[in-house]
Image (cartoon, rainbow, N blue to C red):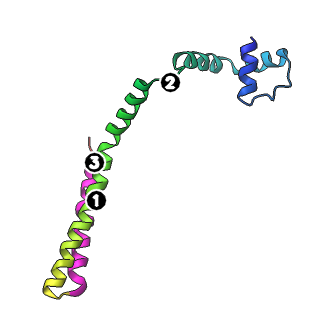
Amino acid sequence: MWRLVKFFTKSGYTDGRYSLATGLTVARIAGKRFEAYCAMEKKQSGFSFKRSAESFQDNVQRAGPAAGASYTLIGAIVLLGGIGYAVDQWRGTAPWGLFVGLILGLTVGFYELAKVVWHR
């Protein structure tokens, strides 16, 4: 039972001035949550490079499509905007080539982003 009192003192439920009886009352209030916490603490105690690497790999794999779509969005805007700017310089049609290139870049980029977001 002393572990219960130490747990509630460390976690901020009490400030360490309470007796064992008060700690037991707090422990009774916590009930099942505390038991689940202890089981989880025992199960995941200690640092593991393997668990850390697996977690990192899982996060990267889940974020991959969204990252690819964001790069596509930025790339399409820059590439098509640059082509529009080059057309402006070549033909002398000041802002219109750049404007059309940026609009096409936004359209293509958001289309690719929507494909990733609404993928089934």
- For the residues labelled 1 and 3, the Cα–Cα distance comes to 12 Å
Disc nearest the viewer among 2 and 1: 2
The magenta segment is 94-115
Mark 3 element type: helix
Mark 1 element type: helix
Looking at the rendering, in which quadrant would you find the N terminus? top right
Classify residue 79 as left or right of residue 12. left
Disc nearest the viewer among 2 and 3: 2
Is 24 magenta? The answer is no
Q: Earlier in the sequence, mark 2 or mark 1?
A: 2
Whole-percent x, y for residue 103 in the image: 25, 71
- For the residues labelled 2 and 1, the Cα–Cα distance comes to 38 Å
Amino acid type assigned to the residue bearing label 3 in the image: Val
Disc 3: CA contacts within 10 A as few (<14), some (14-19) or many (>=20): some
Residue 47, numbered label: 2
Looking at the rendering, in which quadrant would you find the C terminus? top left
Residue 73, numbered label: 1
Whole-percent x, y for residue 110 in the image: 28, 59
The residue positioned 43% from the left and 29% from the top of the image is 52
**Quarter of the view holding residue 96:** bottom left
Amino acid type assigned to the residue bearing label 1 in the image: Leu
The residue positioned 83% from the left and 19% from the top of the image is 22
Whole-percent x, y for residue 36 in the image: 59, 18
Q: Which residue is mark 3?
A: 116
- For the residues labelled 2 and 3, the Cα–Cα distance comes to 35 Å
